Image (cartoon, rainbow, N blue to C red):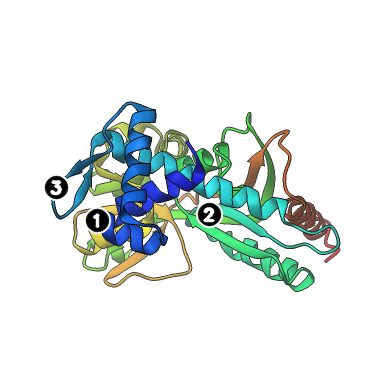
Amino acid sequence: MELRVLNYFLMAAREENITKAAQLLHVTQPTLSRQLMQLEEELGVKLFQRSNHCIVLTEEGMLLKRRAQELVSLAEKTRQDLMQKDTELTGEISIGCGELQSVDFLAKLLARFQVEHPLVQMSIFSSNTDSIKERIENGLLDMGLVPEPVDMTKYAFLHVPQKETWGVLVHKDYELAEKQAVSPSDLLHVPLMVPNGNLIQGFVANWFGADFDDLHIVGRYNLLYNAAILVRNKIGAAVCIKLDCSYDDTCFIPFSPPMESGSVLIWKKDQMTSPTTAAFLEYSQKCVKSILTNTI
């Protein structure tokens, strides 16, 4: 499969119309149709259901679309890395970020690094830990900022010197909203939504202790914004970390006893990185070391 043909396929899949896709690609309709049919022959599957007015992806076509998007993104990232000049850092640093207070620390690092290297661009991908790790493994991200605990067997890492405070996001009309802090027993009969991820759930379970098995868990989530909307509609309360933002009709209450977690910047062990990515990692390590030793 050629990247050019995969781009043709993605455009046709997006537009669901051969004529319009051909116009956007600046090729003739017969050329595009022939390329797509040759791709189907090469793979031995039917990628589109065709009619007089539109084309729709088959199940095999939807699978190829996901893979093709990753391949095209990886090829573009590789092209940018190879184009970097020896004399001045250019290119892009791609970072996956969870919803964390420590993103503020990362932003400060990026801002200071960009002052010294103004031609460097940043690409930020927001998601949960599992998705970020998958994209790092596939070469689509250079690194990721994720909450602890994390399995570090595959990754090099840098501890971020900023803690995350855990608690619960509740609707302001709940009696719970009047409390200054909540204990495990306060949440026993409250419908709860908890974060996805076995490691994170295990971390939360340790705080609840023996009460964890008696909790009324009504759902799980990966990003807090949508969970906050569910909280606002009184579906339940969300176990989460405190963020520098507010959601209408909700309030955050910290845990008691307090529960904190750290964050880490992770990247693949023993992997060659672009000069720009390597420079940023080195810069980050020096900054964190300076902070920890009070020399900055």
- Which circle's residue, 1 or 3, is located before the other in the chain? 1
- Which circle's residue, 2 or 1, is located before the other in the chain? 1
Asked if the residue at tag 3 contacts the one at tag 1, i.e. Cβ–Cβ closer than 8 Å, the answer is: no
Of labels 3 and 2, the one closer to you = 3
Q: Which mark is residue 178?
A: none
Q: Which mark is residue 97?
A: 2
Q: Give above or below for 198 relative to 106.
A: above
Secondary structure at badge 3 equals: loop
Three-letter code, disc 1:
Asn
Residue 42 in the image: state x and y as whole percent: 39, 29
Three-letter code, disc 3:
Ser
Which residue occupies the extreme left position in the image?
A: 52
Viewer-nearest residue: 13 or 130: 13
- On the question of residue 184 being in view, the answer is yes
Secondary structure at badge 1 equals: loop
Three-letter code, disc 2:
Cys
Secondary structure at badge 2 equals: strand
Q: Quadrant of the C terminus?
A: bottom right
Viewer-nearest residue: 75 or 119: 75
- Which circle's residue, 3 or 2, is located before the other in the chain? 3
Asked if the residue at tag 2 contacts the one at tag 3, i.e. Cβ–Cβ closer than 8 Å, the answer is: no
Q: Residue at x 53, y 54 (%)?
A: 97
Viewer-nearest residue: 61 or 205: 61
Q: Residues within 10 Å of mark 3 (few under 14, many from 20)?
A: few
Viewer-nearest residue: 84 or 97: 84
Q: Which mark is residue 51?
A: 3
Q: Residue at x 21, y 67 (%)?
A: 173
Q: Residue at x 64, y 51 (%)?
A: 79
Q: Which mark is residue 17?
A: 1
Residue 199 in the image: state x and y as whole percent: 47, 35
